[in-house]
């Protein structure tokens, strides 16, 4: 079982488990994020793996919960599925979990793209240049072409 001792020769640093709990107290983290942050702080891979396993068994760390919280947060910010997916991949979340969580969010991405566009721009796009600008804006927020064109069509009406 996990000893709780820190293997690095730092003396007064907390155990890997305690450090991970401290990180999780601030916000949810994926396993990959915890591993990366703890490794940067000098904890051994074995101590990190044991600490994470203990946290998961205690229900304190869950990639599923992290993913759900992250997706809700990004939806609240008006980000589209492509951007959310890319950010989750960077945080080490599996493609399967990302797909399942985005599907479970039950978001109408076309409507959301339209709402984001309406918040940013108060009037309909006039010319082709303005339409292109708005499409680039939606792409930067993580909406795909279909969602962006649908939002722009709704904006024109």
Image: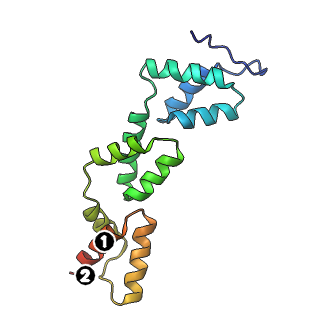
In the picture as drawn, the residue positioned furthest to the bottom comes out as 127
Q: In the rendered image, which quarter contains the C terminus? A: bottom left
Spot occupied by residue 38 in the image (x, y as percentages of width and height): 64, 31
Q: Residues within 10 Å of mark 2 (few under 14, many from 20)?
A: few
Q: Residue at x 25, y 81 (%)?
A: 156
Q: Residues within 10 Å of mark 1 (few under 14, many from 20)?
A: some
In the picture as drawn, the residue positioned furthest to the left comes out as 157
Q: Which mark is residue 151?
A: none
Please, is residue 47 above or below residue 41 in the view? Answer: above
Spot occupied by residue 155 in the image (x, y as percentages of width and height): 26, 77
Residue 90 vs residue 10: left or right? left
Which corner quadrant of the image does residue 80 belong to?
bottom left
Please, is residue 147 above or below residue 75 in the view? Answer: below
Spot occupied by residue 154 in the image (x, y as percentages of width and height): 23, 75
Return the residue at label 1.
Answer: 118
Element type at mark 2: helix
Element type at mark 1: helix
Which corner quadrant of the image does residue 8 belong to?
top right
- Residue 35 or 21: which is nearer the viewer? 35
Q: Which mark is residue 156?
A: 2
Q: CA distance from mark 2 to mark 1?
A: 11 Å
Mark 2 or mark 1: name the one nearer the start of the chain.
1
Q: Which mark's residue is nearer the viewer, 2 or 1? A: 2
Q: Residue at x 25, y 64 (%)?
A: 111
Please, is residue 70 above or below residue 34 in the view? Answer: below
Which corner quadrant of the image does residue 135 belong to?
bottom left
Q: In the rendered image, which quarter contains the N terminus? A: top right
Q: Residue at x 32, y 77 (%)?
A: 122
Q: Residue at x 58, y 23 (%)?
A: 49
């Amino acid at each position: 079982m996990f000893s709780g001792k820190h293997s690095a020769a730092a003396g007064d640093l907390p155990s890997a488990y305690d450090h991970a709990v401290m990180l999780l107290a601030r916000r949810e983290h994926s396993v990959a994020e915890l591993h990366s942050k703890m490794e940067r702080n000098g904890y051994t891979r074995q101590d990190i793996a044991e600490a994470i396993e203990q946290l998961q068994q205690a229900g304190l760390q869950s990639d599923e919960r992290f993913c759900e919280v992250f997706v809700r947060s990004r939806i609240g910010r008006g980000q589209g599925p492509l951007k959310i997916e890319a950010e989750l991949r960077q945080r080490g979340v599996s493609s399967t979990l990302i797909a399942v969580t985005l599907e479970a969010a039950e978001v109408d991405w076309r409507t959301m793209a339209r709402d984001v566009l309406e918040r940013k721009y108060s009037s309909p796009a006039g010319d082709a240049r303005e339409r292109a600008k708005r499409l680039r804006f939606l792409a930067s927020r993580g909406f795909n072409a279909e969602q962006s064109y649908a939002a722009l069509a709704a904006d024109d009406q």
